[in-house]
Amino acid sequence: MTATILDQIRGIASDLFGIPMDRITADSSPETIETWDSTQHLNFVLALEETFALQLSPEEMEQMRTVGETARVIENRAHAGSH
Amino acid sequence: MTPTIRTPDLRHEVDRLIAAGSADLACLSLAELWRNEAGAGLAPFLISRFEQLCGKVPMVPMRTAILRSFTVEPVVPLLRAEAFVRGMNLAVKLGDFNAFALEILDSESDLYKFDPKTVILAVRTAEVAPDLWNQYADLPADAIPVIIRRVSDSFNQWIRVFRERSPAALIVHSMEQPARPSAGVLDSQLESGQRAAIRQINHELRNIASQHRDVYILDYDALMGLHGRLRWHDQRKWLIARMPIAADHLIYLAREWMRFLVPLSGRTAKVLVADLDNTLWGGIIGEDGMTGIKLSPEYPGASYQDLQRAMLDLARRGILLAICSKNNPDDAMEVLKNHPGMLLRPKDFATIRINWTDKAQNLREIAAELNLGIDSLAFIDDNPFEREQVRKVLPEVIVVDLPQDSVGYAAALRDSPVFERLAVSTEDRQRTSMYADQRERAQAEQTFQSKEDFFRYLQQEAEVARVSPATLARVAQLTQKTNQFNLTTHRYTEQQIAEMADRPDWQVLSISVRDRFGDHGLVGVAITHDRGDACEIDTFLLSCRVIGRSVETALLSHLAQVAATRGSRQLLGRFVPTKKNAPAREFYAQHGFEKKADDHQGSVWTLSLPESTLSIPDWIRLNTNEGDHH
């Protein structure tokens, strides 16, 4: 399950930030990906909400500083049941 | 909602096709990808690939500016992706956040510098009428009409000024209603309730729009209502990003915008070609028979009636309907003519193809028969295999997907932007019946011994009239559009026609025709010019709807009579050959004219009026109405 969610998020990030999926790791962040700016961060949040059919809270958005952390936030939601 | 599943295989396929230079197939794969997983995640991929394909596949460019009072940035990639899939390359300019009024009023603003073809004014009640939205409870009753006036005056000013400064089409969001009105259920009991006030503003807005050319209202409240106000709105996103719309609903705003941009770009369908079995009715007529197919007001037949109702609605907008079905013609026609559950009848279709030939070939023939480009056709079929075939063989045809469950057929049709129209004329409404009348006429013709018998049976009645303000646009349009039966193919604008009509030595006449099958409307134009003792025919044309029914003889005879009455001794005609006007080549020879000369433009013909035996055929009743200019 973990691998699937992380991979799905890597796929979304790949489409959104325009870089190949194999160059996106759990450690990728706005610091390592140049195209990950504030506008794209909003798009990233929206794509996640759309893909996983949930709504993220401002607190959760703050925790999403890397791709790996984002995966953990989504996983927690999945374990907690639907939104 | 089920989580979307990414399909990396199709992404690789797209990149492989682009690398191999197969632009058309790459577009098809991109469109399939978008159908599978349209959304914020996919949009950037789709846009970057379509951008690589621009120049390799035909794309209609369009410049669109979005003026807004809220965050719409995330909608832009969705809009551009939707547009690309429909063959449009949108350049989008976003106005500054909540700066729309200034941008409209300042003639030097970036809005006008951008030179958009279309502009969307996406504003909300909360920003345009904050008092009505947030402080309704504090407002005395007599303040409400003042607010309504203030808001409609503002819209009036913005729209008027915009119209003065830009020729672009303007799409204005109407005002949304609050999900929970300030006064609760009491709101609906009050004369000046919050919702009533917003309804009033929207009513005023519609009036303002109707006073200006190319200003259209997007019913934002209805759009929210369609998707559910509570699901549409995302309060958290509003508070943290000034983005009031939930992530999974942004696509619906993009699609609503497309319902305007598609007709404004001309990328619309003019004909809807429908399959029969399991599309217009449930079951297969060849196997289930008249009593076995499902077509009635009850489930499951009701779904098919719903689809037929949606098709009738399209016909009223001027979209032609046609049938393309692999079937035994006798079986299928029996349903079309006599099944009590059918809402559509043979007369509702411009053409009917029931045979065993493949659909692509039939679609090509339908386009040729109706004299339209293949890209004017839209196609519906319940069978995904047939749809895929048509997509592959004729990528220009707009294939509208139907869902698995027939309950969703009508909605699929109504949701497609290619059938949207922003204005409908009387001619549009009657278009299918004109084609159907034509077909019935053609059938009647086959059963008569001689052409004259048929003409008598038709009971044609024609009216010749001087061009008037009411007919000016149609007359100019005919000179611009008529290619086949057109002796000189002079193209004129409304302005030029009006100037000719004002000169005493020129006559601009139109002819309207009706017969026992229906009204053809204004179908012909003749323009003559007196020169000494001769009357020269500058323009003589007839719409192909009425060619070959001796209307042309009647009109020419009329010109001869009138010229003789005015003292002309001869009628002078010219034939200027073009690639398309062969049907008119023998016209003057057939009517007793003598060829005088051939020159670089064509041939010159004369008819001596005192010796002419030209007369109006006895099977046409010709009325004249040439006295007055209206």
Image (cartoon, rainbow, N blue to C red):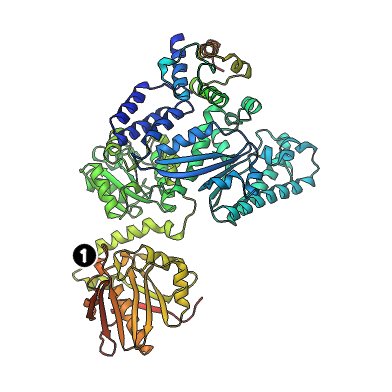
Q: Quadrant of residue A19?
A: top left
Q: Position of residue B432 (x, y in %)?
A: 37, 55
Q: Which residue is at a point 63% across and 47% down the rendered structure image?
A: B104
Could you tell me the amino acid type at mark 1?
Thr
Q: Which residue is mark 1?
A: B447
Instruction: Work out whether residue B5 or residue B351 is closer to the camera in this orientation and state it.
Output: B5
Tell me: residue B607, above or below residue B338.
below
Q: Position of residue B147 (x, y in %)?
A: 74, 46
Tell me: residue B548, above or below residue B75.
below
Horizontally, is B629 left or right of B165 in the view? left
Horizontally, is B302 left or right of B132 in the view? left
**Number of residues whose C-alpha sits closer than 10 Å to that of mark 1, classed few (under 14), some (14–19) or many (20 or more):** few
Q: Position of residue A2 (x, y in %)?
A: 46, 9
Q: Position of residue B27 (x, y in %)?
A: 35, 34
Q: Which residue is at a point 54% across and 16% down the rendered structure image?
A: A31
- Count the numbered circles shown: 1
Q: Is residue B304 visible?
A: yes
Q: Quadrant of residue B275?
A: top left
Instruction: Work out whether residue B413 or residue B547 is closer to the camera in this orientation and state it.
Output: B547
Element type at mark 1: loop
Horizontally, is B133 left or right of B248 in the view? right
Instruction: Work out whether residue B595 or residue A73 is closer to the camera in this orientation and state it.
Output: B595
- Label 1: chain? B
